[in-house]
Image: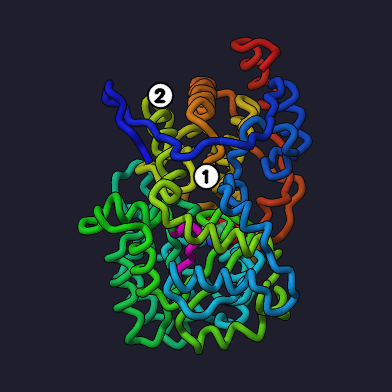
Amino acid sequence: MSIRLSDGTEIPIEMHKVRIVQKTRLAPARERLKAIEEAGYNTFLLRSRDLFLDMLTDSGTNAMSDNQQAAMMQSDDAYAGSESFYRLLDSVREIFGYEYLLPVHQGRAAEHLLAKTFVKPGDVIPMNYHFTTTKAHFNLAGGKVLELYGPEALNTQSSHPFKGNMDLDRLREAITQAGPSNVSFVRMEATTNLIGGQPFSMENLRQVKALVEPLGIFLVVDGSLISENAYFIRQREAGYENTSIRDIIREMMSIADLCYLSGRKSCSVRGGLIATNRKDLHDAIRPWLPVYEGFFTYGGMSSKEIEAMAVGIREMTDLEVAGSSADAVKYFVGLLLQKGVPVVTPAGGLACHVDAMRFIDHVPQSEYPAGALAAAFFIASGARGMERGSVSMDRDEEGRDVPSDLELLRLAVPRRVYTMSHFQYAADRLQWLYNHRRLIGGLEFYEEPPVLRFFAGRMKTKGDWGTALTEAFEEDFGTGC
Ligand SMILES: Cc1ncc(COP(=O)(O)O)c(C=O)c1O
């Protein structure tokens, strides 16, 4: 939730108190340089002890509530028939209105099961935008991901409220071209992670359903960030201003045929699930659950996490919880806009996204500007963000680099973890970096795995710009922090 101060400024206000804290350390810039060099200029390979702010992701890094922690104490560890599972099932039925539930260990496990069950070689899977793990699983099953976003989606300086909408004409054309029987399903990602956490509208979801249903194609929602998408619908879509997050989520679920999610985001727990009212879909996936994940009543999750998820699903419908990340992102984006740093607008869910192609427009896409900016920002601040650009795209079948639509440095805002002074610090160091942007150069791979290379690939700088940047930082701030 945001609150207006008497001077008219709006700030995110925390509707909780902090009772447990975890110590962090701000290492000097020299140490940060050494750490990023050892990590192959890949922020995934940094060690936690070297970080001041961990803005890599909001996945599994949110603060849990006291009620989630308490629920973990009453977990039932039975291999089969655990009461914890039935408590989760009750939550899913109450919040989503879905009868059938398949628990999985995290979001990509759900994608794996969907790919295994529904994607056949030569199929296409239309969606508003891909996510890395989604694309990897659907491609491995022989399918082709089609991204059918609207004209505003890739405009980083837009004010369009629903850049996550599907373009209906493109969808119609893609289905006609492939033939409905070659469409595995249509997937709508609630706040498109890779293009700035941008939501879709309820109207768009309804229109997509109306288009695909008569053709016998089912509609899947990736609900990993469902409470944020619901929050934006409430804020931005006419007619929903007074609708509760709970009712908005319920309405979204009544339109979708199936929802899968990573519980690590909106639900603030490490786990995942697939839920539906369609018995045929559920029955098709179900046999594979014990093969790849675990028995039907735990699916690879610990019983403690299942209990925390049962509570997390209910809590994400609380207006303050649903908006906790979105409001902080809005504040962070506002600070950066004031300082002239190029960021994606409007502010989305999950993270503040810095537009690397505008920030360091002298670094060509072939030299991974978003990866370079992520490394440079770590040197300048001790804060770790994530590259969301061409490093996050795997090579094509011919071994060629695939340039990403956007080159973004994603600075994730885990729910209820960081405070305003953290955002002010990060914004200040980002402004410093922007003023010294000409010092930043490109990167090249020297170790590159074939799939999801962004996780484990190692790079080096083109020219020793890491040292030059560190020296400039020390000139301004000294050799301390
Ligand atoms: C939209 C979306 N879908 C799927 C996933 C994959 O989930 P997980 O990381 O739990 O495997 C993520 C993870 O960030 C995501 O953001």
Q: Is residue 150 magenta?
A: no
Q: Which residues, given as a range, are shown in magenta? A: 221-226
The residue lying toward the viewer, choosing from 88 and 215, is 88
Q: Amino acid at mark 2?
A: Lys
Q: Is residue 224 magenta?
A: yes
Furthest toward the left, the residue is: 239
Q: Tell me the residue that label 2 is attached to.
A: 339
Q: Quadrant of ligand 1?
A: bottom right
Asked whether, in this view, residue 340 is left or right of residue 302, the answer is: left
The residue lying toward the viewer, choosing from 275 and 85, is 85
Circle 1 Cα neighbour tier, 10 Å, few/some/many (<14 / 14–19 / ≥20): many
Q: Amino acid at mark 1?
A: Arg
- Going from the N terminus, do you reach mark 1 or mark 2 first? 2
- Inter-mark Cα distance, 1 to 2: 24 Å
Position of the N terminus by quadrant: top left
Residues at marks 1 and 2 touching, judged by CB atoms closer than 8 Å: no
Circle 2 Cα neighbour tier, 10 Å, few/some/many (<14 / 14–19 / ≥20): some
Asked whether, in this view, residue 422 is left or right of residue 204, the answer is: right
Q: Tell me the residue that label 1 is attached to.
A: 415
Q: Position of residue 259 (x, y in %)?
A: 48, 71
Instruction: Establish if 427 lies above or below 207.
Output: above
User: Residue placed at 54% from the left, 84% from the top?
Assistant: 282
User: Residue placed at 58% from the left, 39% from the top?
Assistant: 55
